[in-house]
Amino acid sequence: MTCVVCKLGQTRPGKTSVTLDRGQMTLVFKSVPAEVCENCGEAYVSREVSRQLLASAEQAAGLGVQVDVRDFSSSHA
């Protein structure tokens, strides 16, 4: 797809990092599958990946996590 940010590049399969903040909690997910713009680097995650990220965040919040860095690809293989 054409990048909606720069409107010049095409997206290609790749990986990105996603940071989620909620109240006092900060979660960083590394190696998240995404479509990444070859021109500007903007990353787009799928609806399913977004669902998985949010489910992990809900679980972490329930456990009282304040700060965590996770490898998405190994925890969602």
Image (tube, rainbow, N blue to C red):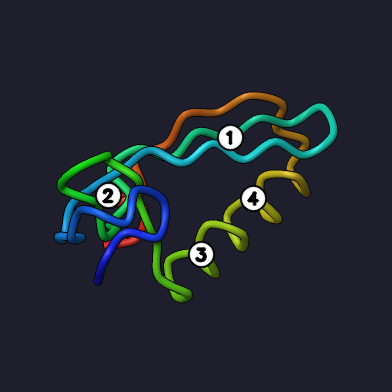
> Residue 56, located in which quarter of the rendered image?
bottom right
Judge depth for marks 3 and 2 and give the one in front.
3
Name the amino acid, label 2: Ser
Task: Tell me the residue at 35%/37% (across/down).
Answer: 30
Q: Which residue does the numbered mark 1 point to in the structure image? A: 27
In the depicted structure, whether residue 26 falls above or below residue 61: above
Mark 2 and mark 4: Cα distance apart in space:
16 Å
Image marks 1 and 2: residues in contact by CB distance under 8 Å: no
Percent across and percent down for residue 18 are: 46, 41
Mark 1 and mark 2: Cα distance apart in space:
16 Å
Name the amino acid, label 4: Ala
Name the amino acid, label 1: Leu
Judge depth for marks 2 and 4 and give the one in front.
4
Dot 4 alpha-carbon crowd within 10 angstroms: few under 14, some 14 to 19, many 20 or more: many
Query: Earlier along the polypeptide chain: callout 4 or callout 1?
Result: 1
What's the mark number on residue 57? 4
Task: Tell me the residue at 23%/47% (across/down).
Answer: 15
Image marks 4 and 1: residues in contact by CB distance under 8 Å: yes
